[in-house]
Amino acid sequence: TEDPMFSRTLLAAAALAGLVADAEAFMPAGPAKLPSIQSARINARTSAAGPVMAVPFKNAEGRKMRVAVVGGGPSGACAAEVLAQEKGIDTYIFERKMDNIKPCGGAIPLCMIDEFKIPTDVIDRKVRKMLMISPTGKEVPIGQTLADDEYIGMVRREILDGFLRNRAIDFGAEAINGLVTKIDIPAEGDYETPYTLHYSNYNGKKVGTPETLEVDMVIGGDGANSRVAKEMDSGEYNYAIAFQERIKISDEQMSFYEELAEMYVGDDVSPDFYGWVFPKYDHVGVGTGTVINRPAIKEYQNAIRERAGAKIEGGKIIKIEAHPIPEHMRPRRVNNRAVLVGDAAGYVTKCSGEGIYFAAKSGRMAAEAVVSLSKGGSMVPTQSDMERTYIRDFDKAYGPTYTVLDILQQLFYTNNPARESFVEMCESEYVQQVTFDSYLYKKVQGNDPVSDMKLLANTVSSLVKNNLRSDLPKDRTFYNPVESLQRL
């Protein structure tokens, strides 16, 4: 009998070849119909009376228009940086932990370093080679297509986030070391009543002081567990749990990872993602993630340590980190004058799990839309305004990337034969070129029909071969229907 999983895999392979050939052709004009992005990824609802454009800013106290940015990571910091440079807007940036250490692989593309002017002292390592390791232990080195000046930057989030946040503060954003606990939301269609943020102001203290702040717009860059998203009724989404250990290894072991990162696939390290060893300043980050079997995350972490073996043997665990990672965009990313960016909006890609660049970019794009629409702080942008600018522009620019990576995950992370084929596919110089160019410069690459058809033929051939192999590790079964469907 025909294996339905195998049939679905072949179908996805065909779809992948078409997407790589011309991903833009799959993108509609509007933001709400991205192919293979679930119907839950629709944007905020529009009033039955039709879209409402920007309205004049009014305040009886005579103050400037105020925008609160909740969250001091890349999305919030980059939003605050743009807003702070508009003299007609008072910008506030909230962050509970100014030295927050977020569990994160910490890879950033080359285009982000240039576009966001990231100085070299923020970058721990410049990765120019990657080693892909299959379920059977097959190793495929990739990176030979990179030019001498091309690399993937590796950062520690506490360093990167601090740099971006301090730059926003230098431009004039007022930093509040506080935790937002509640937001009083104006009625739908009310563009004059301020939002009231209730927060605990820690200001370097262990115990926070309850305070409030009235603002005219809210940008939520406060991560997967976003308080802003909950308060603005943005809808639920499924999430992965990412687990990482920072491991201090010997100088000799560290020299192996000088310019090298490793990616492990197999159901032993994750049933739906991958495990990694990424080099940092003086240690390596070793981790994994999963959506469908979150309770077993520590088992998968043990497995990735075992797979890395002697390369990290004897290392000292200096920090253990875990964090939820969104699996898709929020159903509503804009509601009235509240806007979501970064992880709060769900801007993490499938397959690669990348989120830093899209967080920073979404924060900047949302803030640029606010500045442009506000006309020097004299107008209040509405929901319709933000949908037709920030949301539309973000989806148009990056929708193809999310679509291709969504299909890649469905194709290659479902079973060990597919994972083995994934690693084999990476031996192709064409695949490496397309992959690195797409990642480094954030544009879906590949428009060579002959190479695309060869890729399809080789992928299908590899899938058939590996599904017939008897020496591949069998995927373990588990039953976890309730917890794996829990949503944020």
Image: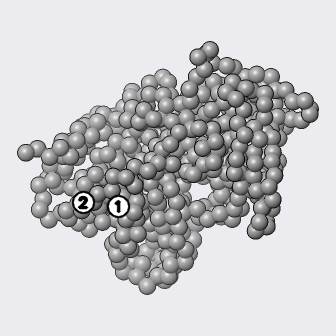
Q: CA distance from mark 1 to mark 2?
A: 12 Å
Label 2 element class: loop
Q: Nearer the viewer, mark 1 or mark 2?
A: 2
Dot 2 surroundings within 10 Å: few (below 14), some, or many (20 or more)?
few
* Residue at figure coordinates x 48%, y 67% from the top left: 244
Q: Is residue 270 left or right of residue 191?
A: left
> What crowding class fits label 1: few (fewer than 14 Cα within 10 Å), some (14-19), or many (20 or more)?
many
Count of numbered circles on the image: 2
Residue 322 placement (x, y as % from top left): 51, 64
* Front residue (pair 39, 277): 39
Question: Can see residue 85?
Answer: no
Most foreground residue, 116 or 368: 368
The colour style of the image is one colour
On the picture, is 20 further left or further right than 251?
left
**Res. 160 image quadrant:** bottom right
Which residue is the site of mark 2? 477
